[in-house]
Amino acid sequence: MKTETDMRTLLIHGGIDGDDVTGAVNVPIYQTSTYEQNALGELRGGYEYSRSANPTRKALEALIADLEKGTDGFAFASGLAAITAVFHLFKSGDTIVISNNVYGGTFRLLNKVFPQFGLNFKVVDTSDLEEVKQAVSEDVKAFLIESPANPLMTITDIKAIAEIAKENGILTIVDNTFMTPYLQRPIELGADIVVHSATKYLGGHSDLIAGLAVTNNKELAERLGFTQNATGGILQPFDSFLLIRGIKTLSVRMDRHIENARYIAEFLKDHPAADQVYYPGLADSDGYEVNRRQADGPGAMISFRLNEGYDLKKFYTSLKVAKLAESLGGVESLVCHPASMTHASIPEEVREKVGITYNLVRYSPGLEAKEDLVKDLENAFKESRR
């Protein structure tokens, strides 16, 4: 899936490249809240107040629009702020169909926040196209999918979902956090809106919180821009600068993340401590061929079920290189317990039904030596053996 300009080049030179005024190779940090106006109704460069627009944030928004092959990008204070803005596109009585394993914060928004405004949702297995078709009804206005989905790495055929959506006048929204535009570009596959928790791989260094949204539809862009300004959940200039900087190294980081993930997944699939391994890069994984068609790689996220012969708590405390922490996609390896951390807001009976069980472990390989990461896991298995 090649683009006109190689993605590795676009990551560095996409959007607004450098500064025309001074020749600086990096976009400056415009750390200002307001802008002097030439006269009443006469703005300088279209800027009046940094909630509405800021040059550093504008450069980031142009960059993510280029990378995702959209027309307009929007930067928010967090991934959940981005998704919240997208949900504001809908009205009371509308229904959104979501994947049956999505980020817990997304589920919490739909389950706890938006019901008071009359927004409904259905949970389906979006990897099953027949189930998706059966979920379509007059009130359904959007499909919200993740592929791979968090945390079971379920693969959904984005192009097929978008086709079903278009046939029924429904929007397709894709959370592309796990893959990034380096590996997968949902708008090219027919999606209407792409969202990111840019805190993760795009930022890449566990030092910022940010969210992004992209669309190729001018009407949707106008409405998203209005919501961004009206509700004010914007990304600050310094964090916008950090995110641009992080994106510049995305290709080399993702290549290393994937190298490490493949190595670890191969180790885990043959280890007695891991009853089941979820990684789209394994040839026998569900959705392997679909992912090969729609993405330029398998991503780097792994989940596995710890065998009952191992103590779960002892396993986590025995890890020395990988850190027990929320989030993913940083230079350091992070491990988490979805049932009590990222997906704790999902009711237990729903988690169990989907497969987010107590013994499920989610692993985000960092950029450390892959041999050290496997040694770390091996030691933790050894220490936690009952």
Image: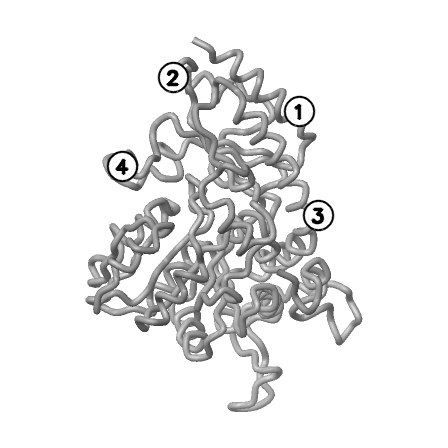
Q: Is residue 376 above or below residue 83?
A: above
Horizontal side of residue 67 vs 327, given as left or right? right
According to the image, label 1 marks what residue?
A: 372
Give how far apart the Cα atoms at labels 4 and 3 are: 38 Å
| Sequence-wise first label, 1 or 3 | 3
| Callout 1–callout 4 Cβ contact below 8 Å | no
Q: Quadrant of the N terminus?
A: bottom right
| Callout 4–callout 3 Cβ contact below 8 Å | no
Q: Check disc 1 and give the amino acid type.
A: Asp
User: Which mark, residue 252?
Assistant: 3
Element under disc 2 = loop
Q: Nearer the viewer, residue 237 or 162?
A: 162
According to the image, label 2 marks what residue?
A: 308
Q: Residue 305 at what x, y percent from top left?
A: 42, 27
Q: Nearer the viewer, residue 167 or 301?
A: 167
Q: Residue at x 29, y 60 (%)?
A: 133
Horizontal side of residue 51 vs 351, given as left or right? right
Q: Check disc 4 and give the amino acid type.
A: Lys
Q: Crowding near pointer 3: few (<14 within 10 Å), some, many (20+)?
A: few
